[in-house]
Each structure stands twice: as structure tokens, then as C-alpha cells.
Amino acid sequence: MQQKHVLVIGGGISGMTTAIEIAEVGHEALLVESKPYIGGKVVQFSQYFPKLCPPQCGLEINFNRIRNNSRVKILTSARVNSMEGSKGNFKVQIMKKAELINSKCTACGKCADVCPVERDNTFNYGLDKNKAAYLPHEMSFPFSYTIDESACLRNECKKCLDVCEYDAINLDAREELIEKTFHSIVYSTGWEPYDAGEIALLNYGNHPDIITNVEFERYAAANGPTAGHIIKPSDQSAPKTIVFIQCAGSRDEKHLSYCSSVCCSASLKHALIASEKLKQVKILIFYIDLRVSGRNEDFLKQVEEDENVELIKGKAGKININNNKLFVEAEDILSGIKTKTESDLVVLATGIQPSLLNSKLPKDDYGFLLNDKLPEGIFASACASKPLDVSASLKDATAISLKAIQN
């Protein structure tokens, strides 16, 4: 068997799966990830469906598969700078960010202890702060501290240098250009949540108690900014009423005209989490259609039976802010009545959009890569090509890994 070298761009769960599947049949895979850790969006979840497992379950299995397979190489804090050539001979330039903390790091945390600079914690979507020298999260792979170049004072400070006992810090490090040749390339670049600030009538950004579904996910997570407590960001108290607004920007010609397919299941999951954590809470979910599939249909049955939750078929069109209180305007389609509901916390179910919006590769009208029009030897996996949940992403990644090593 001729051994092939495959470049996998994106270290989320689909990229990891692609790289592992390629390596476990005897080929070489280089996994390039722009963040300082792999795991993608899944590692930021509190639970993922259909089993409602914490992300540690599936990710730790994959991390061990990577540790035990020398054919998988990982390059974090790196981006593809350029590529040329064709199938079997792609010449790729990869830019590796300056490695201010190197592989000698033992994750002792002393650098963060003495670091005087705080930054928005990107892992928690800026909902709290951490230091410029930081461990991204407790499951980080590689398990190493990193330094935010944009926040670090470098040689004006040097406090981290004084306390590091392992010569793991080099504040003079510079970025590195790496050139390699690959047989094929897989884009597993994942997704980003739609910017809710673009939906003017929903007032996101104008009141702290209007949040998005991905922010709710971090509040619900045990390793999130509130250690899993569902709170009103405005005053840290427990909300008595929560409104979930489905299709916030989705199925809307002014924003995302398509259905992201996972938002309904996510909000049903969030409603169950909120109902369990806040025993007396009142939860309303305004929806156009509830689109769930496979085992995710179990969520719908559980929600329908939950006394704390009310499902309302109707489009929520506006959130008013009066005297610092939130009022959701919507139409109950089944009754034909326009409603105005006061809520302590409003969660916007924003849709999925591809991370590679500015790519020059062939895309559909929404920015997803088109596998049937990509150059031979280049493939798009999972949410780089269409909105998918975790289970479907894994299946798609496995299929793409086979195509990437075929002649």
C-alpha cells in the first residue's frame, strides 16, 4: 500500500475523526487548527445529543486514539497560508503562530498566577475573563498553557519568565512558515453562530439578559463562567421566566434563509436543562416548526411532558426593553392572538453558518463548500459543507476520510 499524506484543516470533532480514520488504515494525517487546542465547538458544550453526554465522553476517546497513533500529527495555533498544485501533489504553506509557551510546559499554572493582564475568555464567548497566560480549558489538547499575543505585555512585564521553572516560555518567539506536500486536503473548518446583533428587532447587545443559544450552553456547563448555574447576567439571580426564540435570523431572507437543522434540538435540550436546574421556572419556546430527527425526537416528547415548559407555535418578531424589563412580542399562530410576554431571560436560537465564508473555493449561496465542484483531491467535511449535528458530522467525516485516501 502506498502511504498517503493528507492535510486536514480544522481540529473540531469532524476534523479529528477524519484524521484518526485516515491514520488508522495506515496513512499520514496532519491536523491543522487555528486555536491553541483541538476539539472545536463540541468541547464548549455542556452536553450533546442524543445521549446528553458531557463532551468529555467522546472527546477523551478520540484524544487517546490520537495519542496512540504516531501517524496523526497536530499543529495548533496555525493556519493555511497558501496552496497550489493538484491531487497527489498539493504544495501547502502553513503559518504557525509564535509559540510563546512551548512543549516543555507542564501546565503548572504559575505563569497565569503572576500574569497582570486580563482578557475576554474566548472559550466562554467573552462571558468572563481570564489571564493573557492561560489554559484554554481543563481538557485542553495539547494540555498546555498558551499566551494571547494581542494581550501579552511581553518584555515590558516578564513576570511569567521569572516563575517558569522549565524554560517553557520564550517571549521573543516569532511565527514560523512551514511548507509541506500532501496527496489530498480535507476542509473540516466547522461553523460559527450567526451574529445575533444583525437582527435589530431582537435587541441583542442592548440588554445583558438577551443571550444566544451558544452563550446559554456555556452558562449551563459545569466548567462555564457560572459553574453550571443558569443566571440572569444583569444581576446574577436565577430567572423565573425564560423565553426561547427559535429561528433567530434563520429561515429569513434578510439573514440566513436556510434551516440550520440543529437549533430546535438544542433549544429542547436547553429547556430540559433549565427545568431541571430551576425547579420553579416557567419556560416558553416560540417556534415556526419544531424540526427534530432520529433519537432527538425523544427530546420533544420529554419537553411536551414537562410541566415547566410551554411550546407556542408562533414567530417571535420583536423584543422590547421597557424600564429595563424584557417583553417578547409574538403571534400565537394556532389561536391567532398576538402576545406580549415579560421574561427574565431571553435565549436566541441563532443558526449555523460556515467558518469559511471568505474562501475562494466553490461555495453555495450560503457559503458552504460544494463537494461536487471542489478541485479533485480537495474535500469538505461536516459543517464545512452543510449544517449537521454531532452524530451526522461523525458519519460524514468518516465517509470523507475514505474519499481522501482513494486514488
Image: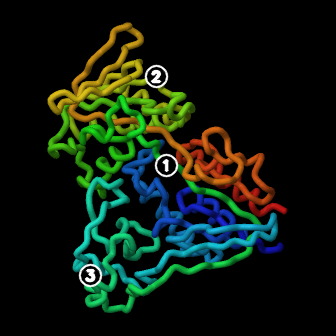
* Residue 182 in the figure: left or right of residue 274: right
- Is residue 268 visible to the viewer in this orientation of the structure? no
What residue does disc 3 label? 110
Q: What secondary structure is marked by label 2?
A: loop
- Where residue 220 sits in the image (x, y, percent)? 30, 47
Q: Quadrant of residue 269?
A: top left
Q: CA distance from mark 3 to mark 1?
A: 33 Å
Tell me the kind of residue under disc 3: Lys
- Where residue 60 sits in the image (x, y, percent)? 47, 64
Q: Quadrant of residue 338?
A: top left
Quadrant in which the N terminus appears = bottom right
Mark 3 crowdedness (10 Å alpha carbons): few <14, some 14-19, many ≥20: some
* Residue 113 in the figure: left or right of residue 151: left
What residue does disc 2 label? 288
What residue does disc 1 label? 192
Q: CA distance from mark 3 to mark 2?
A: 51 Å
Mark 1 crowdedness (10 Å alpha carbons): few <14, some 14-19, many ≥20: some
Marks 1 and 2: which is nearer the front? 1
Closer to us: 314 or 20: 314
Q: Quick check: marks 3 and 2 in contact, CB under 8 Å?
A: no
Tell me the kind of residue under disc 1: Glu
